[in-house]
Amino acid sequence: MDKVEAKEKQHKSWTMVAPGWGKYDPLMRTWAAPVTERMIALAAIREGSRVLDIACGAGEPARAVAEKVGPKGSVLATDFVEEMVGFARSKAKAHALSNIEFRCVDGEVIDAPAGSFDAVTMRWGLMFMPDPVACMRRVNAALRPGGKAVVCCWTEAADNPFVTVPLGVLKRHMVVPEPPAGAPGIFALASPDRLHAIFAEAGFHDVAIEQVTIPMADFPTGAEYDVFIRELAGPVASLFVQLPADVQACVKKEIARDAEMHSSKPGRVYLQGITHVVVGTK
């Protein structure tokens, strides 16, 4: 798969689940709050900061950053899925945030004026880019000297049952090829060494990586989790729609059952996620 094909595949996948990100935005904002707060702290974002948020999805952490920088600061939030940007824009308007601008732009080709931002944030976007180094080089160019970039990427599959549970079910019913080394995907940047190398190659120094654990599913029943993950996770949704209707019905039941089996809390479906949080300085 070449970069153009990979990009088209990612765009189709995330366009498919954009309504789900709108639907579940309140939950995701709550669950991911510890990650957002850590990103803001590591990026040294404060009142008056100028921030670029890439792959903003439904508007996080852009909205939280806009609230932090206040009217004296500014946020430019971008995503390459128009439906995501539209929801994020409407949410910011509903909260009367006038210090944030949204653009539908591919993060790998974003063309920001050199040195125009104090910080750049990117939560769960870099691993889906065919050329993450190219993206981070543009991030570096957009930062002022001493500015910080903070990026989040999921850790190894074994640490993230919220994804591996549904993927495990799908693999019982269809052939899911293992992605080639370096291919974009949800666990493409699970290796801390690769993340460090990408930041270094893009020109960052003082690179540090830590992990944050958050709930990525917390529902009374497995059936509710099944709907959630198929409506929110692009990689899961794009595989599920390829199945015949009768197999889809079976897969839904198996995802619900397996989620209940793997839950770490009795009486609920609770599945965690562990994400890397990487910071580098220009």
Image (cartoon, rainbow, N blue to C red):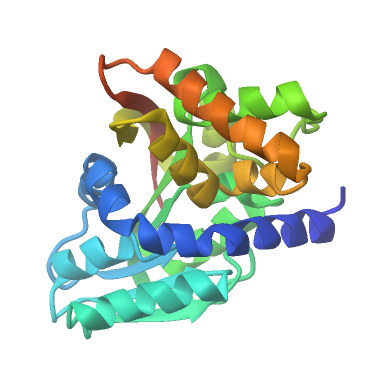
Which residue occupies 33% across, 60% down?
A: 60
Image location of residue 237, percent across then percent down: 62, 47
The answer to whether residue 255 of the structure is visible from this angle is yes
Viewport quadrant of the C terminus: bottom left
Relative height, residue 11 to residue 200 (above, below): below
Which image quadrant for residue 214? Answer: top left
98 displayed left or right of 193: left
Using the image as rendered, state which of residue 135 and residue 217 is in the foreground: 217
Which image quadrant for residue 197? Answer: top right
Which image quadrant for residue 213? Answer: top left
Using the image as rendered, state which of residue 159 and residue 240 is in the foreground: 240
Using the image as rendered, state which of residue 235 and residue 244 is in the foreground: 244
Image location of residue 230, percent across then percent down: 54, 45
Which residue occupies 58% across, 69% down?
A: 80
Image location of residue 11, percent across then percent down: 67, 62
Which residue occupies 59% across, 44% down?
A: 127
Relative height, residue 31 to residue 139 (above, below): above
